[in-house]
Image: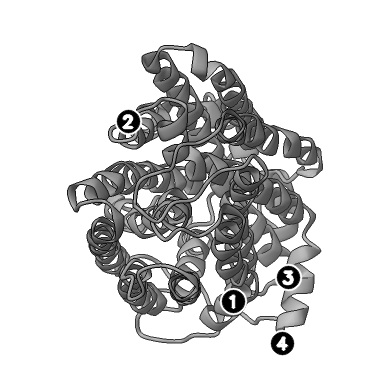
């Protein structure tokens, strides 16, 4: 590791990987459920299972991918070979999800499920090494926050481009199966760009010192789950990810059934959700320096939840007002992502300092498995809400006419449900007490007596004794 500041080219190079994670984290959650219900004619409840189960598989695959990358030795380091191989495989497999060799019916549904399963596996071998890297790039908690700020800025851009443009590509391609095929190719190209960018951009970055690891996967998982700050943060983030994913899953349905703007609505909703995040990212970085990461995470989550609850009034509001409320939700989402991801490397560094063993891959394997499960659980829950409210599927590529009860399900699943999922787990953060002082005690380092103006103990850099 290095305690010195990372070059800006490494910040940018690492952040480009978020083109990959942003595209895959956004587009399936946004379009796969509507693709199944409104193009392939799959019932909402079954579609929810088809979206959930392949990603739930990652709960098993991600820790394995982490352990494999921990043990890898190559001239490119432990992580970068998987960034290249996993990213390129992901691009090809993503396009295959929407290839639609079967027009509709059970065969089409089974094909999508299998293709999505293979794609989720490839993503695990990209995402786990990618998320593991910050703990090895620098030992400075404040530097990790800066690194995460760059990453989340690019992630927001990736979500904006993939989430806003993908529905437009579907429409431009003729809707239905042809439009989704073109969209699959577009997102695959975005994934390739991010893969090549992060692989080349991190070629001069520190790779960390390879240390001894626990001898078995079971032993490694026991160590990871025994790390209380990590365990608390993980549970909170998984539940919040499910809340974020319900918003993603409901965008097209909300635009169709509540705003009555099926063509432009999804693109505008995404623009309002993500574009403000690009503007407020520096403000969140300053808030983290002043308030600390945990307090800032709580504040961002409450902003998200308050905005989602306010959106219940959308049927009575002008469309412009609804879009403005979505922008408020986006501001909260940006901060929630920044601080959760900035706190994760601190937990990993704390474990490394205590044990002397490099196990970043196992921690990030559990983290990404949980995140992936949460992002899959959101559409699954939303699909169940649609099923219970009587949503009618269609095989025409256009949503069927829905009852008032079904439209109410669309609204509540997009507003009240994510608000509860993001706000309720905040009570768990009382158990997150990790500070640089604890890191210093575990590693034999010292915390400076005076920190920079505006920096709290929770973000003060640790210097080696």
Q: How crowded is mark 2: few (under 14 residues within 10 Å), some or many (20 or more)?
A: some
Q: Are marks 4 and 2 in contact (CB under 8 Å)?
A: no
The image quarter containing residue 75 is: bottom left
Distance from Cα at disc 4 to Cα at disc 1: 18 Å
Residue under numbered circle 3: 355
Query: Is tag 4's residue or tag 1's residue first in the polypeptide sequence?
Result: 1
Residue under numbered circle 2: 268
The image quarter containing residue 181 is: bottom left
- Front residue of this view, candidates 158 and 113: 113
**Which is more foreground, mark 3 or mark 1?**
1
Residue under numbered circle 4: 215
For residue 179, side relative to residue 287 (left or right): left
**Any mark on residue 61, and which?**
1
Q: Mark 1: which secondary structure?
A: helix
Distance from Cα at disc 4 to Cα at disc 2: 50 Å
Q: Are marks 1 and 2 in contact (CB under 8 Å)?
A: no
Distance from Cα at disc 3 to Cα at disc 1: 25 Å
Q: Mark 4: which secondary structure?
A: loop
Distance from Cα at disc 2 to Cα at disc 3: 49 Å
Residue at image position (35%, 27%) is 279
**Which is more foreground, mark 4 or mark 3?**
4
Q: Mark 3: which secondary structure?
A: helix
User: In this picture, is 280 found above or below 426?
Assistant: above
């Amino acid at each position: 590791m290095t305690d010195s500041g990372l070059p800006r080219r490494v910040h940018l190079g690492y952040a480009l990987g978020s083109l990959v994670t942003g595209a895959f984290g956004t587009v399936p959650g946004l379009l796969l459920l509507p693709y199944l219900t409104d193009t392939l004619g799959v019932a909402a409840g079954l579609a929810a299972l088809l979206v959930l189960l392949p990603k739930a598989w990652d709960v098993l695959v991600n820790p394995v991918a982490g352990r494999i990358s921990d043990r890898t030795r190559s001239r490119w380091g432990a992580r970068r070979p998987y960034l290249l191989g996993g990213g390129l495989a992901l691009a090809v497999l993503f396009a295959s999800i929407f290839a639609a060799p079967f027009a509709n019916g059970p065969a089409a549904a089974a094909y999508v499920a299998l293709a999505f399963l293979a794609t989720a596996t490839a993503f695990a071998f990209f995402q786990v090494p990618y998320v593991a890297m910050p703990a090895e790039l620098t030992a400075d908690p404040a530097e990790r926050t800066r690194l995460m700020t760059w990453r989340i800025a690019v992630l927001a851009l990736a979500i904006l481009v993939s989430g806003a443009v993908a529905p437009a590509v579907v429409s431009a391609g003729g809707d239905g199966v042809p439009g989704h095929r073109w969209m699959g190719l577009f997102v695959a190209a975005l994934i390739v760009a991010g893969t090549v960018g992060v692989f080349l951009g991190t070629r001069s970055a520190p790779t960390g010192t390879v240390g001894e690891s626990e001898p078995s996967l079971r032993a490694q998982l026991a160590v990871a789950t025994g790390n209380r700050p990590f365990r608390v943060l993980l549970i909170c983030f998984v539940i919040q990810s499910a809340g974020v994913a319900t918003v993603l899953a409901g965008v097209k349905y909300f635009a169709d059934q509540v705003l009555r703007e099926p063509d432009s609505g999804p693109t505008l909703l995404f623009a309002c959700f993500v574009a403000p995040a690009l503007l407020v990212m520096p403000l969140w970085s300053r808030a983290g320096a002043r308030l600390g990461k945990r307090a800032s995470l709580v504040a961002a989550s409450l902003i998200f939840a308050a905005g989602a609850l306010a959106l219940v009034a959308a049927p009575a509001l002008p469309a412009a007002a609804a879009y403005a409320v979505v922008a408020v939700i986006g501001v909260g989402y940006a901060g929630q992502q920044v601080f959760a991801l900035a706190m994760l490397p601190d937990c990993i560094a704390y474990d490394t300092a205590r044990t002397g063993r490099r196990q970043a891959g196992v921690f990030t394997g559990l983290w990404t498995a949980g995140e992936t499960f949460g992002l899959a659980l959101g559409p699954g829950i939303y699909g169940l809400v649609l099923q219970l409210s009587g949503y009618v599927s269609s095989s025409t590529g256009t949503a069927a006419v829905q009852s008032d009860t079904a439209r109410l399900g669309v609204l509540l699943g997009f507003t009240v449900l994510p608000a509860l999922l993001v706000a309720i787990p905040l009570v768990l953060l009382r158990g997150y007490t990790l500070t640089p002082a604890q890191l210093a005690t575990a590693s034999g380092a010292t915390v400076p007596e005076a920190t920079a103006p505006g920096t709290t103990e929770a973000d003060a850099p640790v210097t080696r004794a």
